[in-house]
Image (tube, rainbow, N blue to C red):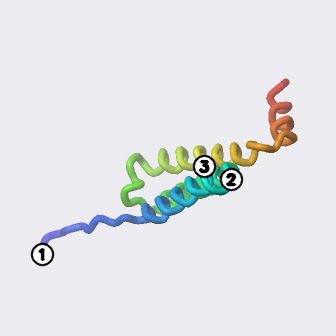
Amino acid sequence: MSDIRRESWGPYPLILAGAAVGVGLVFLVDPRWGGFALGAVVMVGAALRFAGYGGPLAVRSKKTDVITLSLFGFILVLTSLLLYNNELKALILSLFAR
């Protein structure tokens, strides 16, 4: 019997569906909620990649994927929170003003 490995999609459909929902929220509801949803989905992808699930998401090394996805997801979530919040923007900018 030959050793045939079946291609596993892993979490790819979950991430793709979440990204589609996030983009839909950006256009149909509110850019803040859409950006937050997209960032959350990317961070879920990072957590799944860290847990060992890969499928088509495993393009680079595990460490590179987890770091890149985590940073990108965090930046998306932070940006969506700052989108219309002037007080939070002023607080963050004051931290870098020194």
Q: Are marks 2 and 1 in contact (CB under 8 Å)?
A: no
Q: Residues within 10 Å of mark 1 (few under 14, many from 20)?
A: few
The residue sitting at the bottom extreme is 1
Q: Quadrant of the N terminus?
A: bottom left
Q: Are marks 3 and 2 in contact (CB under 8 Å)?
A: no
- Kind of residue at badge 1: Met
Residue drawn 49% across the image and 63% down it: 17
> 29 and 53: which one is in front?
29
- Kind of residue at badge 2: Asp
The residue sitting at the front extreme is 28
Q: What numbered label is drawn on residue 30?
A: 2
C-alpha span from label 3 to label 1:
43 Å
Residue drawn 52% across the image and 56% down it: 19
Is residue 39 in sight in this rendering?
Answer: no
Q: Position of residue 7 (x, y in %)?
A: 29, 65
Q: Secondary structure at mark 1?
A: loop
Q: Left or right: where does residue 37 sit relative to residue 91?
A: left
Q: Position of residue 49 (x, y in %)?
A: 48, 58
Query: Which comes before the other along the chain, label 3 or label 1?
Result: 1
Q: Nearer the viewer, mark 2 or mark 1?
A: 2
The residue sitting at the top extreme is 98
Q: Secondary structure at mark 3?
A: helix
- Kind of residue at badge 3: Gly
Q: Name the residue carrying label 3.
A: 73
Residue drawn 41% across the image and 59% down it: 54
Q: Position of residue 14 (x, y in %)?
A: 48, 65
Q: Name the residue carrying label 1.
A: 1
Q: Position of residue 93 (x, y in %)?
A: 81, 32
Q: Is residue 34 above or below residue 64?
A: below
